[in-house]
Amino acid sequence: MSQTSHTPTAGGDHSRPSGAVQGPQRRLRLAAYPSLLAMPALLLLIAAMGYPLLTVTLRSFSDPAWGLQNYVWFFSTPVNVTVLWRTFSIAAWVTIVCVIAAYPYAYLMTAVEPRLRLVLILCVLVPFWVSGVVRTLAWVILLQDSGIINSVIRLLGFDGVKLIRTQTGVVIGMAQVLLPFMILPLYSVMRGIDLRLVQAARSLGARPARAFLEIYLPLSLPGVFAGAIIVFILSLGFYITPALLGGPRSTMLSTLVQSQVLSLLNWGRGGAMGVVLLVATFVLLALAAPLMRQRHKQASRS
Amino acid sequence: MGSRSRLAGFVGAAALALLAAAAHAQNAPPAGTVVDGSLKGKTLTFVSYGGIYQDGQVAALKEFVDKSGVKLLNDGPTEIAKLQAQVESGNVTWDVVDTDDFPPFVHCGKLFQKLDLTKLDISHIPPGQVGECSVPAMNYGMVLMYKNDTYKDNPPKDWKDFFDTAKFPGTRAIDGSGSPLGGLIEQAILADGGKVDAMTPADIDKGIAKIKAIGPDTIFWKTGAESQQLAESGEADMIIMWTGRAMTAVKNGAAYTPVWKDWLVVMDQLTIPVGAKDTDASYALINAYLGKKSQEILTEQTSYSPINNEAQPKVDASVAAFLTNTPDHAKLGYQQNIKFWVANFAAASDKWTALMAGN
C-alpha cells in the first residue's frame, strides 16, 4: 500500500527533471531527483498500458457513435451483469482458497532448514514455469467425471463428484495457477518476522494459539494483503482456465469481451466491458484500502 | 431495417455474381494452373488456423510456390479483429485469409474484397458454395456422435433424438467454440415443431430455448481438441463434433458412432482482404489452391473433404468413413440458411453468447 501512495508523487515529479537533464552536473541532478529512476518503467507503462487503455476507453464512448450507448447496453443486458457479479465472486473464492493454502506453506518455508526450503521454493516455482494452458489441461484430466479424482472416489465406494464444468473446478484450477503469487509475498513478509517476539509472548504465559493470533498473525497480515490483492486482480482477467474447466455457469467477463471483440468486432462494447471491470476493481480496492492501512499500522505498532 | 436491406443487397449481389460467373467462366485459367516464374521476387502471406490443417494447405500449395517462384509466408490463427485493425490502419499484411463460414458474408466489401470471378476457375467447386467475397477452402461437417455403450441397441437416429432427453437420457456436448451454430439452431426449431423456410428473429429465441432445454449439464466445448478429449475419455453421451476430430477420436479408440442424417455442412472460406498489396498474386494463389491435385493433397494430409469435384484423394478406410463428399454422405448433409444467419448475425451472436454464459 505504501508503494501506491508514492506513485503519484513520482509521476508528478518526472516532468521537471526530464527537461533539466543536461549539462556537466548530470550525476548530481540524478541524485537530487530520485524519481528519475522510475522513468524507464514509467515510459514502458505509458507505451504498453497507458496508451492502449486510453484507446480502449475512448472507443467505449465513441464506437460506433459518441455517447453512452455501450454502457447502457452493458447494464441493460442481464447476462453482462450476472457475469460481472460472477467474475468478482469467483475471484474472491480463488483469493480465499489461495490464502488458506498458502499461509501454512509459507510459514513452513520460514521454519525449515535451508536445503528443505530450497525444495519447497522449487515446488512453488516449477509449476509456475509451466504454461498455464498445460496446467489447465492437466486439471481437465484430473477433474473430469471419468478422471483420476472421481475414479479414486468411486473405487472407495462413494458416488462421483461433479468437479469439471462447475465453479468449484474453476476455483481449484485458478487457485493452483495463482498460488505462487500468494506464497511468495507471504514468505517474504514472514521471513522478516522476528520469531523471538512469539517466544517472548509464550514466556509471558500465552498459549501457542494466542501467541500466534496476537503476535504472529498481525505481523504477517501485510503479506496476506499484498498476496490477496495480486491474486484477486489477476483472477478477474482469467480466460483460459474458466473456458476449459468451467461450464456456462462459470463463464467470466473476459470470455464475453472476447466474443464481442473477436467475433462481433464490437470494439466499443468490448471496451465498455473492460472499463466497467477496471472501475469496479478500483472501487473495490478503494473500499478495502483503509481497512488494510489500519491493520498495517497495528502490525507495525506491535 | 438495416438487416433487411443488407439481406436484399446480399441476394442481389449473389445473383449478379452468378451472372458474372456464367459470362466470364471461360476467361479464367483452369484451376490449378501456375505460370512458371510468374511471381518471382514476390511475397505472399497466407493466413489460416494452424495445426495439421494449415500444414496440409501449405503442402497443397507447394507446387504453386515451386513453380511461380513466390515466397510464401504463413501467419495465423485468423482473427477478424486483427484483420479489421489492418484494414483500418491501411497497412494490410495478409494476402489470402482462410476464415470460418460467416465473416466473408458479414463483412463483404468492408474487410473482404468482392471477388473478380474472371480470375478464378470456380467450375469444379461444389454448387452453391461460392460467395460474393469468398470461395470455399475445404468442406467438412458437424456430425452427431453417440456413445455406443450408452445407447446400445436403441441409438439416436437424427437431431430430434438429440433434443429428446426423455427417450435418450445422457449428457450432450455442443460446439461452443465460436460463432452461433446456425444449422443446430435450425434443427432445434424443427425439433420444436417449428418451420425454417421463413425464419424470423423470434425463431432464434425458440431454437436457443430448445437447446437450453437439454439441461444444465450440457457441455459447450471450446476447442476441437477438447471435443476429441471428451470422446476419447467417454465424458459425454452425445457429442457434436467436426468430422476431422471425430475421425481422429475414433482412430484413437473412442467407442462412438456418427449419425449422418442431416449432418451440418460447414466450410472454411478463402478470402482476399480489402487493401491487400498484390491482388493478382492473391488470385493466382487461390486459383492454384482450387486445382484437382492441390485438393487431393489437402485431403490426404488433413482428412477434410476437397472442394474440387474431380479430386480423387487416396485415403485409407478410416479417413474415408468420415469424408463428407462421398455419395452416401453428401446427399444426407443439411445446409444452414446462410443468408438468414448473415442478416441476423449480431442478434444471433448475442443470444448465442448469452446461452454460452448460462443465461
Image: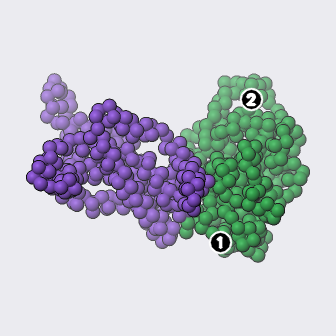
Chain under callout 1: B
Q: Is residue B210 above or below residue A194?
A: below
- Tag 2 residue: B62
Q: Secondary structure at mark 1?
A: loop
Colour scheme = by chain
Q: Is residue A294 visible?
A: yes
Residue A160 x, y percent position in the rendering: 57, 60
Residue B346 x, y percent position in the rendering: 61, 63
Say which amino acid is labelled 1: Ala
Residue extending farthest to the front is A157
In this rendered view, identify the residue nearer to me: A5 or A23: A5
Residue extending farthest to the bottom is B193
Chain under callout 2: B
Q: Secondary structure at mark 2?
A: helix
Tell me the residue at 63%/69% (across/down).
B215
Tell me the residue at 81%/64% (across/down).
B154
